Image (cartoon, coloured by chain):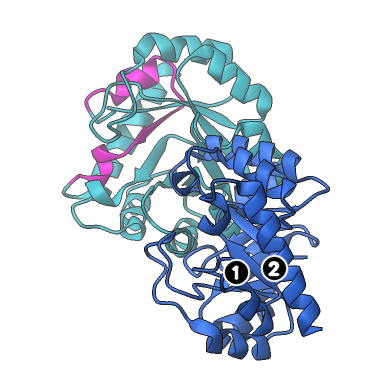
Chain colours: A blue, B cyan
């Protein structure tokens, strides 16, 4: 469900818009697309989210970062929250029952709190230090993945410094999915990069099974 | 209902927090308090909004600027939208029936569109050019107030460059309420400034009646 999770970022995309990144990543087999943009006005975000909603419909889950209002207004499948965003329980109270809520966590305690507050998945963030999010902090590494994996019974994905070279070992370490920004968004061929990562994740899951 | 409408701004407040501005303005008779902050994280905004919700309860209406999710999560009375924020109709679909939606407009057309989309009030913005919002543009003046007043049958308030010297003439021109930032927020005595403006508005309304 969350195997390959692509977070869009126009600043890292070689000129592609959020919608175009989504279109190409979905064509390459991305399972989830998340719109993330901290600079645009609410109106711009809403319009982009509505377009991405249609691109993803029936092909990938569509999430919006941080802005629950934009996510709900655009009919997204879910919202992805950080530790500095709305608390999960507050978001859960506002959202319809089948609306998905994911949250970034840094350790097993944060994961357990988020899960009991109603999170549908947790994202270990960052797994490795990463240039895509300069404020994301030092990577938590594979040991954190294993601790978080043991602490919660919901899907655990990872984000931060993940690419085609290290994705397989993270799946082996227990991740249910891999979230990437630059490994797909900055690739010369977004669709091919998504296809390649998708295959790596699928193969690693088969080996693990 | 919207007679004196105070928009909080920590950058213009001589060091007072949003909550402290609200507390003092409410003590001075403000009818509406709006939390406006474009810099804080969603979590910070949510926590401030929850505190302001309690300060205003039973004493003043409490609005949040732009962020419908924060407004709904904190149990605010309403959201104030700009032309660059979520469209009114999208916000209306997400909000409970008695939740208030206000919107900034610059002319009668925008006011009519907002009203038919479900706005509860419109705010002529800016009435005069103002240093509080450097991107707010050139003031629309008293003629715009009269055109907008004639175009819609909901409350019309004004914001931008309004103070104790010009509030009375704007009420005479047809405004139902006066929204201010610096005229209250930057005053040496926030409570006294609110009391003074409140009395001016009340007197001007009595003269008009």
Position of B113 relative to B189 (above/below): above
Residue on which disc 1 sits: A103
Q: Position of residue A46 (x, y in %)?
A: 60, 39
Q: Which residues are magenta?
A: B165-187
Chain that bears disc 1: A
**Residue B92 is at least partly visible in this image:** yes
Position of A91 relative to B185 (above/below): below
Q: Secondary structure at mark 1?
A: strand
Choose between A126 and B67: the one closer to the eye: A126
Position of B159 relative to B28 (above/below): above
Choose between A124 and B85: the one closer to the eye: A124
Chain that bears disc 2: A
How many neighbours does mark 1 have within 10 angstroms: few (below 14), some (14-19), or many (20 or more)?
many
Q: Residue at x 54, y 35 (%)?
A: A44
Task: Tell me which corner region of the image, top left, top right, bottom left or bottom right, holds residue A100.
Answer: bottom right
Split into 4 quadrants, where in the image is the C terminus of chain A? bottom right
Split into 4 quadrants, where in the image is the N terminus of chain A? bottom right
């Amino acid at each position: 469900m969350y195997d390959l999770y692509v977070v869009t970022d126009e600043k890292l995309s070689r000129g592609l818009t959020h919608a175009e990144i989504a279109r190409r990543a979905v064509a390459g087999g991305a399972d989830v697309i998340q719109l993330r943009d901290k600079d645009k006005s609410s109106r711009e975000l809403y319009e982009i989210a509505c377009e991405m909603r249609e691109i993803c419909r029936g092909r990938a889950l569509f999430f919006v970062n941080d802005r629950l209002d934009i996510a709900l207004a655009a009919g997204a499948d879910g919202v992805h929250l950080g530790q500095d965003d709305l608390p999960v329980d507050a978001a859960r109270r506002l959202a319809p029952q089948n609306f998905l809520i994911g949250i970034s966590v840094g350790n097993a305690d944060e994961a357990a709190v988020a899960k009991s507050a109603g999170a549908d998945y947790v994202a270990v963030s960052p797994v490795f230090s990463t240039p895509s999010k300069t404020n994301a902090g030092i990577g938590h590494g594979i040991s954190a993945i294993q601790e978080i994996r043991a602490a919660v019974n919901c899907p655990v994905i990872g984000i931060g410094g993940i690419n085609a070279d290290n994705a397989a070992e993270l799946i082996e370490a227990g991740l249910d999915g891999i979230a990437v920004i630059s490994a797909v968004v900055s690739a010369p061929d977004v669709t091919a990069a998504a296809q390649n990562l998708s295959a790596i994740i699928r193969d690693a899951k088969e080996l693990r099974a």
